[in-house]
Image (cartoon, helix red, strand yellow):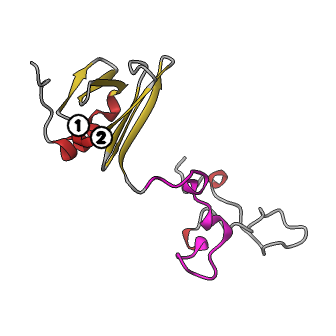
Amino acid sequence: MDAESDMSRRAPEVDAPGAAGSDAPDTAFGDFNVASDFGEIGDATRTAAADLFFGDFAPPLDPDLVFECSASMNGEHGAVALYEDRVIVESPDEPDGEAVFSTETVRSWWLVEGETFFALVVEADVLHRTRLPTGFKAVLKAAFTKAFGPATSPTGA
């Protein structure tokens, strides 16, 4: 059976919003099957559902944040946040669980490959390291390359 003939997949017809005795769903938030029911941004007829946005539930991002990624793997949390003036590395390898250091102190950085994770190592005031899932590798590499140039080996090597 093709999808067009399968009436069970289609939204029920709506008689009139709020009509007494109607089996139609409540349409106060618009018909999610009809994109035009949401209206355009700034449109006075825009429905309440059109104004719901997942980002509204999160606090605003710091305007100085350039890049951030974080993940927990096997009970260990790893994260890196790159700002214009500083880098924050969260890792069980850091003495206090987190290190904050100036971008001006970064001498080199490189990636250490693993099977399901990779490690970012940054040489600044000291060596800083955090592990993240491989899915973050390409975007983290792009962000750090833009900020600090291509990955390099440690200064002392």
The answer to whether residue 46 is magenta is yes
Query: Tags 1 and 2 in contact by the CB under 8 Å rule?
Result: yes
Boundaries of the magenta span: 37-62
The secondary structure type at the circle numbered 2 is strand
Q: Nearer the viewer, residue 43 or 137?
A: 137
The image shows residue 41, relative to residue 87, as above or below, that is: below
- Left or right side of 15 for 54: left
* Residue farthest toward the left in the current orientation of the protein: 157
Q: Is residue 116 above or below residue 42?
A: above
Instruction: Work out which quarter of the rendered image holds the C terminus and state it.
Output: top left
The circle on residue 102 is: 2
- The residue shown at (74%, 67%) is 27
Residue 25 picture quarter: bottom right
Where disc 1 sits, the SS reads helix
Q: Residues within 10 Å of mark 2 (few under 14, many from 20)?
A: some
Residue type pointed to by label 2: Ser
Q: Position of residue 3 (x, y in %)?
A: 54, 52
Seen from the viewer's position, the closer of residues 5 and 95 is 95
Q: Which residue is mark 1?
A: 105
> Few, some or many C-alpha atoms within 10 Å of disc 1 (few <14, some 14-19, many ≥20)?
some
Which of the 4 image quadrants contains residue 94?
top left
Question: x, y (%) of residue 84?
Answer: 30, 50
